[in-house]
Image (tube, helix red, strand yellow):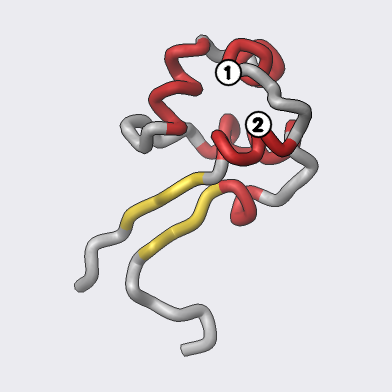
Amino acid sequence: MPKSEVTNSVRRLRFEHGEMTQQELAERVGVTRQTIIAIEAGKYMPSLPLAFKLARVFGLGVEEVFQLEDGYRKDG
């Protein structure tokens, strides 16, 4: 079974949304700046509610912010 890895676009999205700082994003979703740093670095996987909050800040769906790289294709 292939190993699954979740990647994210949080850093890129912050810059695309007015060069939002890590602190600004953290305050908007109710976490610390250190949590945002860890998420962007791929060292911390957010809870599902936090993933939804992050996606909403950017006006996107969760799968547009977080990507599952598992070797499987959706179409079979």
Q: Measuring from the top left, give residue 15's x and y in whole percent.
A: 66, 32
Q: Nearer the viewer, residue 16 or 63?
A: 16
Q: Residues within 10 Å of mark 2 (few under 14, many from 20)?
A: some
Vertical comparison of 32 with 6: above or below = above
User: Which percent across, then down, holds residue 50?
Assistant: 57, 30
Between the C-alphas of marks 1 and 2, the distance is 8 Å
| Residue reaching furthest to the bottom | 76
Identify which residue is drawn at 38% across, 32% down: 41
Residue 39, quarter of picture: top left
Residue type, label 2: Arg
Q: Residue at x 33, y 74 (%)?
A: 71
Q: Earlier in the sequence, mark 1 or mark 2?
A: 2
Q: Which residue is mark 2?
A: 14
- Residue nearest the viewer, comparing 37 with 2: 37
User: Of helix, strand and loop, which one carries label 2?
Assistant: helix
Residue at 50% from the left image edge and 22% from the top image edge:
36
**Residue flagged by tag 1: what amino acid is it?**
Gln
- 16 over 60 or under it: above or below: above
Q: Badge 1: how crowded within 10 Å, few (<14), some, or many (20+)?
A: some
Residue 40 pos. (x, y %): 45, 32
Who's the residue at 67% across and 40% down the image?
55
- In the displayed structure, would residue 65 be above or below residue 4? above
Q: Residue 32's x, y, as percent?
A: 51, 10
State which quarter of the image contains the N terminus.
Answer: bottom left
Residue 68's tag is none
Residue 16 is drawn in which quadrant? top right
Residue picked out by circle 1: 22
- Is residue 9 found left or right of 55 in the rendered image? left
Contact between labelled residues 2 and 1, with CB atoms less than 8 Å apart:
yes
